[in-house]
Amino acid sequence: MNRFLFVFFIGVIINANAQKNEKLILNAKAEIDFKNYSEALVYIDSISEKDYYAFYLSGQSYFELEDYSKAISNFKSCNQLKANYADYYLAKSYALSQDFKSAKTYLDEYLNLVNKRFLVEVTDEPSFSNFKETDIWASINIEETYSIDEKSIARANFYKRKGEIGLALDILDELLEENKNSAEAYFYRAEFIIDLNEDYKYAIADLKKAIKLNPESYKYQKRLAEYYYHELKYSKAVKHFKIVQSIFPYQLENYFKISQSYFRLGEIVEAKKYIDLFLEIDFRNIDALKLAGQLYYENEDYKESIYYFSEAIYINSRRIDLLVLRGNAYMESEDFQRAEMDYNIAANIEPRNGQYWFLKAQALLALGRKDDACKNFKKARYLNYYQADVYLLEECN
């Protein structure tokens, strides 16, 4: 084997191993989201070469299982690969282990970071309840570690939570008059503007300013992608969701959002690629199963479409949107009996919605049950579903 082929095959092996490890981390994170911490550790232990985030998830799992010694060991390994990443959890773990001196060491490190938790979140942290009763805690000048800008942003968030969004925006406006380089202020102002009057154009402009100051911010890029999606700018949404993925590849939700954006663009093949990756990790997500069903429906693969809608309905049998979508797939498959059953369930869950009686009537008509169909067309029309008029004139006279 020549040198070029050898290097090529080594590259392929390394890439395949990296992809396998990434999937294991995503599986572990999904289990943690479902509070299945022991199951998460099984996935993490299968990783051949752990990165900082694998150690972080391992530490988080042991922390939730109250094995603080193992949590600390993993968080320290995380910090060796990415400085300060696990400082806050280390402070919590040491505090719960009653090693308050070490807890102070890591809390001090954490408080020197930028974009840390709000002051009230730190002072009200449940893990610090015993720690706060000590002289060591009293020696920490927590408030002094927060800048004027950080305190202003925290105060703005306080008023926003109270519903006083106008006052919250005034605080951020004042801050930005003094300091036009506060990326966090632009970020929160964008969010508050959406809460106040849904001015996405203004909010997007603020997020762009935040990103210009900190282009590697996961949360800034993510929020911009979400706002573009809301504004139907799906190409831009895809672009920024992919930037999000490049910054932090371990957010499973991102696969769903990229798939959703491609679906809106009509790029079914790309959309399927990302939703398939999502469902490999989490087959319990109803919206992901629904999207998969819609993608197969668009591809006219009604059998697969029905399969995914059925899996979602199994999780929540009263989701009307899923019943209607599966009913539509049954109609395309000419399984009118099952379509009528789904539409009937939807109509009985929400009997004041004329559309469901109309869909049921169409299925009944396809079954040759004209009298029953006309009764349902009439019910749909009574509920102001005007599309029934044509059928009432053509089929029911």
Image (cartoon, helix red, strand yellow):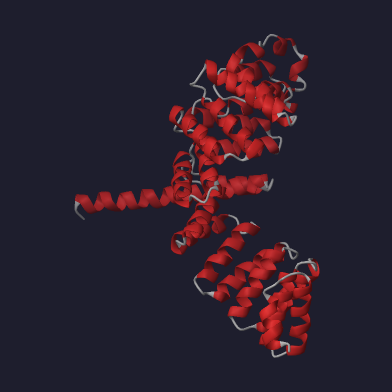
Give above or below for 43 relative to 161. below
Describe residue 393's horizontal placement relative to residue 382 as left or right: left
| Residue 258 in view, yes or no | yes
Q: Position of residue 241 (x, y in %)?
A: 48, 46
Q: Quadrant of the C terminus?
A: bottom right
Residue at 68% across / 47% down in the picture? 36
Residue at 51% across / 40% down in the picture? 224
Q: Nearer the viewer, residue 10 or 298?
A: 298
Give above or below for 94 relative to 315. above
Give residue 319's quadrant in the image.
bottom right
Residue at 47% across / 30% down in the picture? 209
Q: Nearer the viewer, residue 182 or 178?
A: 178
Describe residue 118's horizontal placement relative to residue 8 as left or right: right
Q: Position of residue 199 (x, y in %)?
A: 58, 39
Residue at 48% across / 57% down in the picture? 262
Q: Quadrant of the N terminus?
A: bottom left
Q: Position of residue 337 (x, y in %)?
A: 70, 83
Q: Position of residue 272 (x, y in %)?
A: 49, 62
Give above or below for 329 relative to 173. below
Which residue is most to the left? 2
| Residue 338 in view, yes or no | no
